Amino acid sequence: MLLEYIGPETGEMLSCTWTQHMRDASRRARLFQGMSRIMLSLARLPQPHIGSFRFNASDGTIQLSNRPLTCTMMIFENSGTPRTIQQHQLYRSTDSFASDLLTLYDNHLLQDPHAVRHADDARERMTIRTLLRTIMHCFILSDRRNGPFLLQLTDFHQSNIFVDHDWNITCLVDLEWICALPVEMLSVPYWLTNCSIDGIIEDEYSTFDQVRQAFLAIMDEENKSVQMEHDVNITSTMRHVWDSKGVWFWACLRSINAWLFVFEDHILPKFSADRALVVDLKQVSTFWQENVGQVVEAKVVDEERYQAELRSLFDTEL
């Protein structure tokens, strides 16, 4: 095992000074430059499959032979969700990958004892899961569905980025979460305005959009000095996915618990101005899977048992 010690002379986590300097234009520009360079460098070489790298101990090489192992996937599996994407599963098409990601979330909903609050909540969640499958084709680029696929950081946040005093990036950690993914999944990190993914609405949406455009402008400049080995225009694709609302579809396939709100705030308005439409469409949940009525009853029982066990823990401590 090869370990690297990151001492104070290397830098400190971006999260340590994030709130203090996030509005400093000079520091932010340097951060955006560094992030853009990293994203473009990873995306420079085309990959034939959707997956992740495996280390070969015998010769010290890496090979794209592992499933697309994302941080979200491991959080689900570590909480008890059955493995949906098997260890050696690689994908040659975006469609099959997206379908299996949706199945992973379905399995998590079935397994998690605290997945729903009550029967109506269960129906609403199952309706949205069904609708995500229905509209999936609207957000997959037909000319890129079979690749090329590009390397991306799937756990790219402030505590995994080390910077110096001026916010030049000096180090990255948690590189094991790098995956080869569809180009549509490349996006400007949502946390750049210090807002949660489900909080980017109304005024926060406008604020984030301004920062997003500034980030992409810097990325355009950095892209001029990178020799891509494929014909994908990275920033043009990122702008298209934003305009088409595809960025929010893929956010629903990445987010652990915000997908419900992201769907209602960003994807639903693309198809209907009626914000109450999901409530009216709850019968669609019937098509989520067989015997949905029994599943709903079981999930309500799970929640009641979960709440009872939680109360008993607090009662014991008191």
Image (cartoon, rainbow, N blue to C red):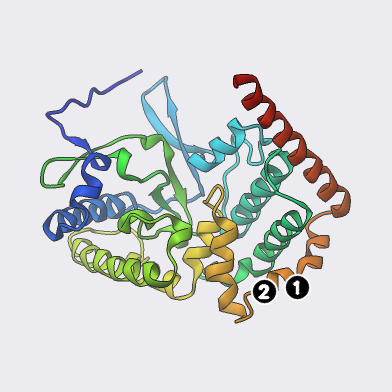
- In the image, residue 233 lies at what x, y percent? 34, 68
Q: Is residue 203 above or below residue 288?
A: below
Q: Is residue 243 above or below residue 71?
A: below
For mark 1, does the 10 Å Cα neighbourhood hold few (<14), some (14 to 19), or many (20 or more) residues?
few
Q: Which residue is mark 2?
A: 276
Q: Are marks 2 and 1 in contact (CB under 8 Å)?
A: yes
The amino acid type, in three-letter code, at marker 2 is Ala
The numbered mark at residue 280 is 1
- In the image, residue 124 lies at what x, y percent? 71, 60
The numbered mark at residue 4 is none
- Front residue of 192/149: it is 192
The amino acid type, in three-letter code, at marker 1 is Asp
Q: Tell me the residue at 16%/34% (across/down).
A: 11
- Front residue of 147/287: it is 287
Q: Secondary structure at mark 1?
A: helix
Q: Tell me the residue at 39%/60% (across/down).
A: 187
Residue 93 seen in the current view: no
Q: Tell me the residue at 78%/58% (across/down).
A: 288
Q: Tell me the residue at 60%/82% (across/down).
A: 273
Q: Secondary structure at mark 2?
A: loop
Alpha-carbon distance for marks 2 and 1?
Answer: 7 Å
Which image quarter: residue 317? Answer: top right
Q: Is residue 318 above or below residue 82?
A: above
Residue 109 seen in the current view: yes
- Front residue of 113/65: it is 113
Side of 137 relative to 152 (left or right): right
| The N terminus: image quadrant | top left
- In the image, residue 257 lies at what x, y percent? 56, 49
Q: Is residue 263 above or below residue 169?
A: below
Which image quarter: residue 267? Answer: bottom right
For mark 2, does the 10 Å Cα neighbourhood hold few (<14), some (14 to 19), or many (20 or more) residues?
few
